[in-house]
């Protein structure tokens, strides 16, 4: 089929149709992404160590300078950092979320989260979620080491972070943060659901009790080590009173009171060293 377009009137008509179609698509996308359809778009960023370790080049060690550049970018682009518990309250109680919410998470409980990350977060009016590994914190509480390039938070440090009001504490297992026979806290192929549930429940509740006793905080968010998820884990998390879980699946979350199950499968974007702030943010925040 041939379409004949003649003169300026024809060209203007075609341009008009294209503009109208683009506007329609934009309106639909905004509606689906940000309102009743899919939910509120919430990117979650994943950091680990915010410090200096020149001997180790890693996806999981970022200098405080780059971390600060990231926080400045978020602040200048109108993002408001929220806790995971704010997402939970939005889903369960419809408590309002700010425009352009973002969640900043830091895994493993490095001491430098207190030394470097906390002051930077506070300087930019941001807040973060620090998910700690119980056995690491127990070891460093017994033998404190002040070197922020590799040390872990003590119970006292965790209490300090929680009381700052800028940090939500998460559970990252007591001692299932390894790649031995089991990958993180994943169910083993030959393991019964009952045996797996008991093992996971024992580990997580051990850290919950220690955090309550020694740091005065009881987390409601869990972070899967290595993002290794087992379907059966959600039932254990729910039975222990966790309201949300962080994975490592790289996706924007759409938070909605009509889809509470999404809180147990929150996706995150790992922030690797070596990528300029502008490039990283444009890559992961594009849809929000
Ligand atoms: Zn971890």
Image (spheres, rainbow, N blue to C red):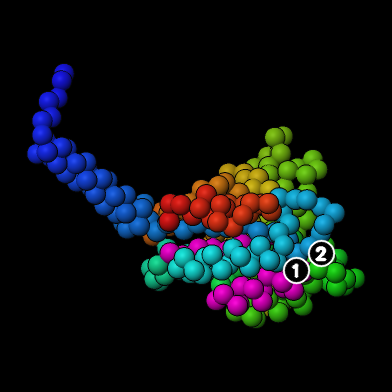
Between 246 and 67, the one nearer to me in the picture: 67
| Residue occupied by mark 1 | 112
Task: Check the image and report above or below for 259 versus 12.
Answer: below
Report x, y in % for residue 137: 79, 66
Report x, y in % for residue 138: 82, 67
Q: Is residue 121 magenta?
A: yes
| Residue occupied by mark 2 | 149
Report x, y in % for residue 281: 53, 55
- Looking at the image, which residue sits at the far right? 143
Which residue is depicted at the point 64% across and 48% down? 227
Image quadrant occupied by the C terminus: bottom left
Q: Pick whichever of labels 1 and 2 is earlier in the sequence.
A: 1
> Could you classify mark 1 by the number of other residues whose Cα lies within 10 Å: few (under 14), some (14-19), or many (20 or more)?
many
Task: Check the image and report above or below for 53 versus 16.
Answer: below
Which residue is depicted at the point 22% across and 45% down? 19
Image quadrant occupied by the N terminus: top left
Left-right relation of 91 to 159: left
Q: Which residues are magenta?
A: 100-125
């Amino acid at each position: 089929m041939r379409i004949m377009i003649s003169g300026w009137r024809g060209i203007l008509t075609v341009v008009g149709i294209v503009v109208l179609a683009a506007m329609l698509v934009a309106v639909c996308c905004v509606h689906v992404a940000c309102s009743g359809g899919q939910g509120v778009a919430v990117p979650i960023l994943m950091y680990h160590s915010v410090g200096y370790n020149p001997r180790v080049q890693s996806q999981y060690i970022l200098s405080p300078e780059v971390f600060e550049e990231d926080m400045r970018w978020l602040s200048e682009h109108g993002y408001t950092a929220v806790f995971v518990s704010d997402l939970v309250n939005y889903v369960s109680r419809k408590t309002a979320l700010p425009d352009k919410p973002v969640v900043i998470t830091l895994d493993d409980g490095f001491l430098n989260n207190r030394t470097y990350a906390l002051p930077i977060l506070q300087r930019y009016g941001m807040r973060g979620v620090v998910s700690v590994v119980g056995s690491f914190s127990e070891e460093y509480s017994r033998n404190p080491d002040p070197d922020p390039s590799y040390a872990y938070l003590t119970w006292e440090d965790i209490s300090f972070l929680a009381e700052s009001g800028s940090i939500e504490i998460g559970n990252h297992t007591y001692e299932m943060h390894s790649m031995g026979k089991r990958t993180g806290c994943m169910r083993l192929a030959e393991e019964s659901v009952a045996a797996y549930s008991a093992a996971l429940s024992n580990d997580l509740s051990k850290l919950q009790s220690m955090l309550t006793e020694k740091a005065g905080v009881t987390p409601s968010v869990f972070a899967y080590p290595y993002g290794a998820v087992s379907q059966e884990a959600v039932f254990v998390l729910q039975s222990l009173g966790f309201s949300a879980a962080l994975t490592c699946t790289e996706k924007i979350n759409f938070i909605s009171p009509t889809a509470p199950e999404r809180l147990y499968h929150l996706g995150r974007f790992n922030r690797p060293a070596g990528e300029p702030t502008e490039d990283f943010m444009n890559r992961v925040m594009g849809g929000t």
